[in-house]
Amino acid sequence: MAAQTEINLPAARGRLSRHKPLAELTWLRVGGPADHLFQPADVEDLAAFLRQLDPSVQVFPIGVGSNLIVRDGGLRAVVIRLGRGFNGISAEGGIVTAGAAALDAHVAKKAADAGIDLTFLRTIPGSVGGAVRMNAGCYGSYTADVFVSATIVTRAGEIREITAEELCFQYRQTAFPEGAVLVSAKLRGPAGDPAELHARMEAQLRKRDETQPTRDRSAGSTFRNPAGFSSTGQADDVHDLKAWKVIDNAGMRGARRGGAQMSEKHSNFLINTGGATAADLEGLGEDVRKKVYDDSGITLEWEIMRIGDPLPE
């Protein structure tokens, strides 16, 4: 493991921790410690902290860790995790304003209560901050389709609004400013009947539980679809260039490495069966990428973010 960095951190009203284990903050439950973890009290606390933090120190924001592998050697950075002061949700005039720490599922339900259709968010694991940064989507809908604007705190500690044009939304990625932290977002969805919206979400949940390993320790979809778009959920959906299909074709459904496995239920889900290391999980993912390339000439791109340092050989 690389040497942990000792730096003088600015004073803050929020919670500061040194050498914080990150495994407990990710859905896959793997990974080494961050040099520092900062949980700001509010937006002003975060802005003041970043303004005073040595510009050479790397900053890495994380949400609920639903789409993340932290390598076993940990992360040489100040990890910023937003909590209770950043999870509010309100709806007015057809627009939902949600804190970055608000869970996607909660946003979808609150929106439905207000007659706003953000139902595609209901089955997406994670929080609004991650949904915006990664342009999360399913059933043919994407965050970009409903995005109005977001508030960010830049690495220099400036609080400002950011537009869709600046984010340059693409399939599963955006041009999010380096080192910035998203603190809230405004989303506009079509109008709908609350009862119908809630019924649709219940149907989506049943379908998800039938087709995905929701009871296993996973991080959602492992690889982006080579086709460059998500499943629509419709009967005429085409599967030839879906990640799960090319993984199946390469014979990697159920493949294992250590405590890591490609799910038998959905072959694009990487799961920790118990006792997996980050190296097991990432290594299995690379095994899959190689086998798929050898089988079809397709290079799968990771959808799960991998960060930090591996342990030394």
Image (cartoon, rainbow, N blue to C red):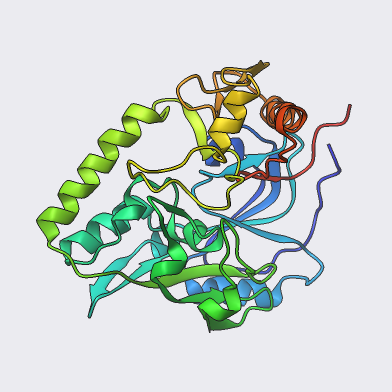
* Residue 83 drawn at (x, y percent): 45, 57
* Residue 199 drawn at (x, y percent): 16, 47
Depicted 147 relative to depicted 194: above or below: below
Image quadrant where residue 57 sits: bottom right
* Residue 102 drawn at (x, y percent): 38, 58
Q: Is residue 29 visible?
A: no
Is 131 or 14 nearer to us in this picture? 131
Residue in the picture at 26% in, 34% down: 206
Left-right relation of 19 to 229: right
Residue in the picture at 38% in, 29% down: 211
Left-right relation of 105 to 82: left
Depicted 184 relative to depicted 16: above or below: below
Residue in the picture at 48% in, 49% down: 230
Depicted 269 relative to depicted 136: above or below: above
* Residue 26 drawn at (x, y percent): 54, 40
Is 251 or 42 nearer to us in this picture? 251
Circle count:
0
